[in-house]
Image (spheres, coloured by chain):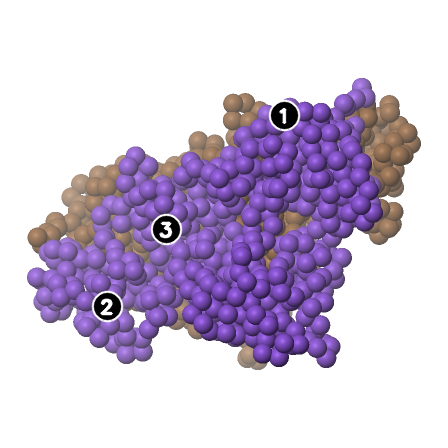
Chain colours: A purple, B brown
Amino acid sequence: MTHESNKKVLVIGAVAGGASMAARLRRLDEDANIILFEKGPDPSFANCGMPYYIGGEIEDRSKLSVHTPKSLKDMLNVDVRVLSEIIKIDGDAQVVTVKEVATGSEYTETYTELVFSVGAKPFLPPIPGIDRPGNLSLRNLEDMDKIVNWMSLGKQDAVKTAVVAGGGFIGVEMAEQLRVKGLQVTLVEALPQLMAPLDPEMASMVQHQLESNGVEVILNSPISAFEPKADENARGSQVVLNDGRRMDADVVILGLGVRPDTDLAKAAGLKLSPRGAIVVDEQMRTNVKNIWAVGDAVEVRNPITGGEWLVALAGPANRQGRLCADNICGKAKAYKGTFGSSAVRVFGVTAAGTGMNERGLKMAGIPYACVHLHPTSHASYYPGSCMIALKILFQSEGSDVGKLLGAQAVGADGADKAVDSLATALQAGMNVHDLADLELCYAPPVGSAKSPINLAGMIAQDVLDGLVSIVQWTDLSKLAEDPDVHLLDVRKPGEVAQKPLHAKAQNIPVQELRARVDEIPRDKRIVTFCASGKRGYFAARILMQRGFARVDNLDGALATIHASPLMKSK
Amino acid sequence: MTHESNKKVLVIGAVAGGASMAARLRRLDEDANIILFEKGPDPSFANCGMPYYIGGEIEDRSKLSVHTPKSLKDMLNVDVRVLSEIIKIDGDAQVVTVKEVATGSEYTETYTELVFSVGAKPFLPPIPGIDRPGNLSLRNLEDMDKIVNWMSLGKQDAVKTAVVAGGGFIGVEMAEQLRVKGLQVTLVEALPQLMAPLDPEMASMVQHQLESNGVEVILNSPISAFEPKADENARGSQVVLNDGRRMDADVVILGLGVRPDTDLAKAAGLKLSPRGAIVVDEQMRTNVKNIWAVGDAVEVRNPITGGEWLVALAGPANRQGRLCADNICGKAKAYKGTFGSSAVRVFGVTAAGTGMNERGLKMAGIPYACVHLHPTSHASYYPGSCMIALKILFQSEGSDVGKLLGAQAVGADGADKAVDSLATALQAGMNVHDLADLELCYAPPVGSAKSPINLAGMIAQDVLDGLVSIVQWTDLSKLAEDPDVHLLDVRKPGEVAQKPLHAKAQNIPVQELRARVDEIPRDKRIVTFCASGKRGYFAARILMQRGFARVDNLDGALATIHASPLMKSK
């Protein structure tokens, strides 16, 4: 039988969520009339790839155009209208007014369903001079071309210096790519750390990676103004920090975060959240009849806290688009929320995370503990393994004690792999005991018999079982000053000489500990530490069983301390 | 308070499970008397690394010795006795008799707990001449040294030709490594495929990878004899296949599988399974009081079928060892079974799998379906991405319909990463809908907005929802011969010309399908196909909605067909 459809579905915004919605809808309903409106000239472009075109890693610009209007028409029979802005929506009459950007002419279009996939726009705070020429943000291919043109690389007026404002995903990626292009790059961040989704000691490794590749990173420094350079005719700006420091930049990349692009939604009567995002139900339905919304402009549920949050990520946008199409076709599928799994690659090192970080857990009032470890990416005896800095966060009290709450990893190999499995575990509701039991793939070139995730689970188990008590890198300064605390370094003397942690620390290698236990004061709280946490744990177990009243192991030990902001401030 | 222990724990076998057991036990009980017996000269060596030492990728032999008796004594205060064979066990009196291999002298040792970590030994079937000089298997470092010595590389009598008997993990790894060393290598397998844990079309890619790197692979060929070469004084053997073929080999590697090493266990009265493995309860306890067993010698539960199976893998052995120590110390932890997650790396390509394959599901009588897909390892527009061949198997009927049952992947990058996440999902009891929803880490250099796992879940969802019906590569020959079946190739004509699938197939590119739908016969069953399965799916959806009565898409399409044994036999 031939299928007949009465659907006329208009989609506002043709990237990620909108394009996924249209593609899925066509597969479900061959006869629906689907029109995709895009304000700009490009539908369905690969926005996450733009920094790499600017940096030259992607050489062919056309690779960023996942689809053209013609290919979408041919493949999906979707009517794509670029340079077409929706300027008015009458939700009662189910009619939109479309403005053709090129001519300014307007027309109306009725709908049976309307889908907002409007995304988020760069946040431009009211800093004096923020709109100066050469202050450029990156939302779409037009922005990308503007940056490339402004840079004039290979020409006489090529830019030499760049300031990247903001140390989030786009800021870090752009800093990397501009540096790859040979620019002198300074990354300026108002907060005390880069990459807000990561905890500070993990973000600090991203910072180190940027710095060791020649990017200057300035933290704790809001920008107070963009002013002309001393030579007023020179291209670019002088960037003024709140402490008065000034630096010249031939180009400024504004990566100060994004905000839901919801002026039109507001005008159409869509309910917005306090943060200005579109409020939708589990099926991506807004409060206005037959209007749906997906992607970076909608508020989503955080399945861990049960609250709502805003997450601008391509994966969730794509899945919401698909799910929205299912629901338009009556399949009644629920979006279960966004866990915030993400990754960034910085000069050959990947930082990845999923779920909650410490700040988020504190804000949500969820009792948690965390462990740090530094396993190798594959069997250490097989060539080419490298260290992964891995952190997991888990519930420390209550009926869900041990439940995984989040994970972060940084490494040249295996960090994204580990976090992908941990993201799966998180979404499955696994706890640290499940992680200890997890059976992952092993061959010496691709893994370890005890995988990094097994080890993380085992350490967390030991903490929860009271087999070991740990202190964190943030506790170290206070502990070192406490006269009742005795620091015990259980590394070999050669290691201590090479990388001392604290002058106060006593050194007894763990191998000699049983024989020399009487050299350790019994009236003090002992804090054991080593290079990565393992030998310190062995030592703590020995001392705990030899009657020492209070023993703590420094979690993650020197590998975490040395990566942390603690050492950077020294 | 000081802890006092009455435990005296003897461990038979000091690799993987035994070493893990001892290390964990020491952390739990500082005062236990722990004695580790090892028949050979090396405790705690990295047996999985041995092929790579033979192949020269691992240059330093000492890297394979994870621990020496001294380092185990220093770190864990464990008494390691190498070259010490347990020859008798009196389970009632709790006494073992130890024979010192070097001197032949014997002594007894009492125990409160005895742990079998005896492993598995190479299976040597009764083939005439199997014990000829130069027929070498690989279980321990002594075997490894024997192989290296026999090969005499760099010397006048260096081996030039090798036959590897058996295409399992060791066989494939050894074939790769001997080829790396410049030998002419032939891999002979009795079964119709290599790598039994993989399904044939996936194993076929491993075979292709070996062949394209110069290893000759002979399937379906049991070896009937090893005979002297024509020149009876020449080193090595002539290998005779059951079809009469003969080939000379200067060295023969016997990789014909392993069997639990349980003669001692049997003599001690331990209950053995029909396959000769030690039967243990969930806590790794045997039927004899205070005797425990872990590792490759024990039968484990298969959590998917609920049955028992034998799995010789390092990861489970290590975790069983740890868990056994917990239980000896009264923690009452249960081993939940082994899922069989494994990986093998072959000339830069990794094949990985977890859970059940088709053969296993058929044997267990579990109704299943599977989907094949060929996503890229990361965003295809970012340089360096490569194709992953991915297959998932899931329940097709019953109350657990959609439940993940297994997964396999082959690729130069990302195969082990994908299977690790799928192994996690499998162990969490996830279904294909969960996979479609899964939120993994994405940045263009390390992933895709829709990850390979999302895509696998989405395709499986569509199959279960009846949105598309699929046929498999195994159905193709029959379908092509069926006069009531119409094959429809929806690729572009240029692609068809380059890689035709079948002369009978009609070619209409999916982009033209809507306009040319009348060219397709309505009285036949239509089977759509393309390069990887995606466009065929689009085409199937169009035709299904245009009133075609029966439409199937060829799952995995040409990418699966071309990798399959189907094409190899042509």
- Give the side of residue B31 with respect to residue B175, left or right: left
Q: CA distance from mark 2 to mark 1?
A: 67 Å
Q: Disc 3 marks which amino acid?
A: Glu
Q: Are marks 3 and 2 in contact (CB under 8 Å)?
A: no
Q: Position of residue B468 (x, y in %)?
A: 70, 30
Q: Chain letter of disc 2?
A: A
Q: Residue furthest right?
A: B519
- Give the side of residue A293 with respect to residue B32, left or right: right
Circle 2 is placed at which residue position? Answer: A490
Q: CA distance from mark 1 to mark 3?
A: 39 Å
The reply to whether label 3 and label 2 mark residues of one chain is: yes
> Badge 2, how many Cα within 10 Å: few under 14, some, many 20+?
many
Q: Looking at the image, can residue A279 be seen?
A: yes
Circle 3 is placed at which residue position? Answer: A358
Circle 1 is placed at which residue position? Answer: A289
Name the residue: 72% across, 39% down. Answer: A86
